[in-house]
Amino acid sequence: NAGVTQTPKFQVLKTGQSMTLQCAQDMNHEYMSWYRQDPGMGLRLIHYSVGAGITDQGEVPNGYNVSRSTTEDFPLRLLSAAPSQTSVYFCASSYRPEVGGYTFGSGTRLTVV
Amino acid sequence: SQQGEEDPQALSIQEGENATMNCSYKTSINNLQWYRQNSGRGLVHLILIRSNEREKHSGRLRVTLDTSKKSSSLLITASRAADTASYFCATDGGTGFQKLVFGTGTRLLVSP
């Protein structure tokens, strides 16, 4: 099993550009989430999904869109990149988060100039 | 807003010593989890403790939970250089298991 795979690992965008961060898991996990990590602030939840076709907002959803058409994939779209979105983005998935915690991807480091 | 705050922010110890990290949170919870993050890597789940549990062990890890004080501690015994990492507590904030709220983390440095 590959676990949670995130692509790309690094990305530089210009202000106003859009892009999609990819996340895929091969563990048949229903629960998937996107977090951003900024220095000294821990991780903050952007969007999450409890199954295919079901998504909801987290703590910091503005400027981001998600969709969940399959169990395996949970892409995160930046609509119009801003310097404030410079961060490290992590995707995570879980089978039963109430007992087993989450499996995290290795992250995407995004810089918006 | 951050649900949890870890204390200390940074901890430096020698190999073989024990490391204790504390986490405080703000609202009622269903469970609390601890994660490790090596530099430049993703987070790794270490242990989960439910709100009705007071203590849990996993190998060299011991986690305690005091819901009356809204606090938890992570003890790593007989630390190794490989334990050098940042450690985060995360709670569900009582809102559901799908919405983890992380603390700001403790950076642990274990020197040989």
Image: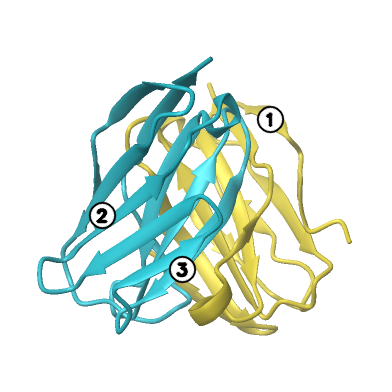
Chain colours: A yellow, B cyan
Evaluate whether residue A78 shows in this view.
no
First reached walking from the N terminus: tag 3 or tag 2 = 2
Task: Specify the quadrant of the image occupied by residue A80.
Answer: top right
Secondary-structure class at tag 2: strand
Q: Is residue B57 left or right of residue B81?
A: left
The percent position of residue A44, horizontal first and vertical second, equals 40, 52
- Asked if marks 2 and 1 fall on the same chain, the answer is no
Q: Residue at x 49, y 81 (%)?
A: A98
Horizontal and vertical percent position of residue B49: 40, 72
Q: Nearer the viewer, mark 2 or mark 1?
A: 2
Residue under label 3: B48
Instruction: Give the label, 3 or 1, closer to the camera.
Output: 3
Q: Is residue B93 above or below residue B46?
A: below
Give the residue type at disc 1. Answer: Gln
Q: Chain of mark 1?
A: A
Gap in angstroms between the C-alphas marked 3 and 1:
33 Å
B69 or A94: nearer the eye?
Answer: B69
- The residue that mark 2 highlights is B4
Q: Position of residue B50 (x, y in %)?
A: 37, 78
Q: Quadrant of residue A25?
A: bottom right
Q: Which residue is mark 1?
A: A11
Which mark's residue is nearer the viewer, 3 or 2?
A: 3
SS under mark 1? strand
Residue under the point 53% across and 79% down: A99
Viewer can see residue B34: yes
Nearer the observer, B17 or A72: B17
Tell me the quadrant of the picture where the N terminus of chain B can be found: bottom left
